[in-house]
Image (tube, helix red, strand yellow):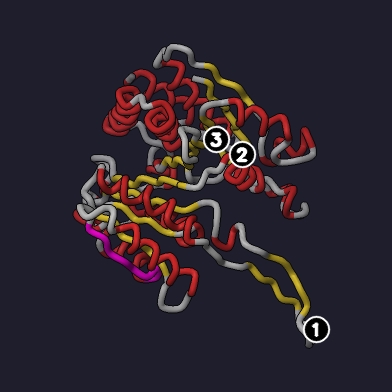
Amino acid sequence: MKIAVFAGDGIGPEVTQQAVRVLEALDLPGLELVEGDVGGAAYRKHGHPLPPETLDIAKACDAILFGAVGDFSCDDLERHLRPEQAILGLRKELGLFANLRPATVFKGLEDLTSLRPEVARKIDLLIIRELNGDVYFGEKGMRTTDDGRREGYDVMSYAEDEVRRIAHVGFKAAMGRDRKLCSVDKANVLETSQLWRDVIIEVSAEYPDVELSHMYVDNAAMQLVKDPGQFDVIVTGNLFGDILSDQASMCVGSIGLLASASLAEGTMGLYEPIHGSAPDIAGQGIANPMATILSAAMLLRHSFGREAEASRIEAAVAGALSDGVRGGDLGGNAGTREIGDAVVQKL
């Protein structure tokens, strides 16, 4: 069990340290952790946010536990040298095309969400976001129009095989849950979305037991607030998935509770909290590490098939929350280390 640990920037090292403590507390046979530099920290040390030595570590490991990247001091760098290029580069180099972001309200936290408690407690959904296409990876640039105006452009595109691949991930996930899949697009105005919808429908023929529905992204954003309990699995493209999954975080109470997995076609996966590097609170010991700890649970489940240990971690987090151990993002005053202590104690 060789795991790369890329802590990154801001609160990344703090929250990742607690997730590592949880993994080590499980006393897993053959566990080996290998650290590497990414993001702004890597740029300052190596001159690049994803140096070759870090990429080599990633390729030599079975899975990656990732903290966060983002550093305001790097905002003026050329785009290919900015911290965020580390995560984009890893997705591309490792073929990480499927992003899984579960959202569930923990018992007792219903009053802390942005929704009415009776609405929030029904949330148990999984957002599956395609990671390797869309405007994030399409042709982009700056140009000058014929009349002298500056113009930025980003091309949104998907090939049918890219859609088909993520569609299978969505349908298979739905088969293991409540067998409902909602495909989110903007097919009424975007040709890319029309292709997306057509291919999703084609793939659905292979999964007759899954109920397929379609929803425009603007309506999906509204429905996530109005009636999130209607969703089981949502599958969507890179841009829409990025936005909707962050919205879902506030529906469950805090972005500090949401884990994610970015999976390749084999067992390789990159696991990270969906929050950013939060440089404004870095070094203060107040960041909530629970999303990173839950990401470690997803790592054990998806890359190593260790369902029992993954469930133990999730139960330990739920137990700590039930005991009232909450960080500032949840209205409490527990520090990063204190939260880690509580989860380890529950294990």
Would you place residue 48 above or below residue 167 in this image? Answer: above
For the point 26% across and 53% down, which residue is it? 207
Residue at (30, 28) in percent of width and height: 311
Distance from Cα at disc 1 to Cα at disc 2: 40 Å
- Image quarter for residue 36? top right
| Residue 157: % across, % down | 55, 65
Residue 127 position, x and y percent, is 37, 51
Q: Earlier in the sequence, mark 3 or mark 1?
A: 3
The residue wearing badge 2 is 10
**C-alpha separation, residue under disc 3 versus residue under disc 1:** 43 Å
Question: Few, some or many C-alpha atoms within 10 Å of disc 2 (few <14, some 14-19, many ≥20)?
Answer: many
Q: Which residues are magenta?
A: 211-218
- The answer to whether the residues at label 1 and label 2 have Cβ atoms under 8 Å apart is no
Residue 145 in the magenta stretch? The answer is no
Q: Which residue is mark 1?
A: 148
Q: Secondary structure at mark 1?
A: loop
Q: Amino acid at mark 3?
A: Phe
Q: Callout 3: helix, strand or loop?
A: strand
